[in-house]
Image (cartoon, rainbow, N blue to C red):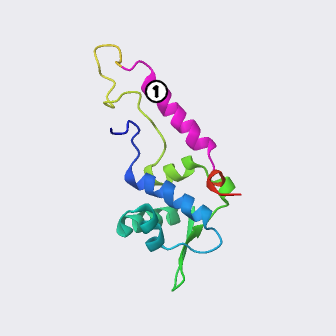
Amino acid sequence: MSSVLKISEAASLALHSMILLAQNRDEPVSVKYMSKRLDVSANHLSKVMQRLVKSGLVNSIKGNRGGFKLGISPGKVSLLDIYESIDGKFSPSSCLLDKNKCEHECILGGLVKSVNKQVEEHFKNTKLTSFISK
């Protein structure tokens, strides 16, 4: 069964890699380590990590024991911050076809709008600290 919720692969990688950085914040985390943990392309992940560096959410550490570390305290970073650093401003459509041109009432009523609002609220209210073991 496919998922109804659609998030770009880059945004998904950013969300998951930021959680790994939050969980390992005492030392730099390599792309190699993250790509193995997430079972994704190291090349694609490297590009995503550079976008996170550019946004200021992540710091890049050069050298043999280098990698990436959070650039901001995990309590100050929401999932929405991460999502928007990759895919831009969260601006959901209320139409599955992203057209709003149907000649009839929406087959899903207000469901699409409601689900998008729930996702936005969840992203806005969930900080990286939610994923760190106490």
Taking the image as drawn, is residue 80 in sight? Answer: yes
Coordinates of residue 63 in the picture (x, y in percent): 52, 85
Image quarter hosting the C terminus: bottom right
Image quarter hosting the N terminus: top left
Q: Nearer the viewer, residue 20 or 80?
A: 20
The type of residue carrying mark 1 is Lys
Question: For this view, does 90 lie left or right of residue 104?
Answer: right
Question: For this view, does 104 lie left or right of residue 12?
Answer: left
Coordinates of residue 27 in the picture (x, y in percent): 62, 74
Q: Nearer the viewer, residue 74 or 57?
A: 74
In the rendered image, the vertical position of residue 43 relative to residue 73, given as above or below = below
In the rendered image, the vertical position of residue 111 relative to residue 72, given as above or below = above
For the record, the magenta segment spans 108-127
Q: Is the residue marked by circle 1 packed among few (<14), some (14-19), or many (20+) residues within 10 Å?
A: some
Taking the image as drawn, is residue 56 in sight? Answer: no
The secondary structure that dominates the magenta segment is helix
Q: Quadrant of residue 24?
A: bottom right
Residue for point 49% across, 26% down: 114
Circle 1 is placed at which residue position?
113
Residue for point 35% across, 65% down: 41
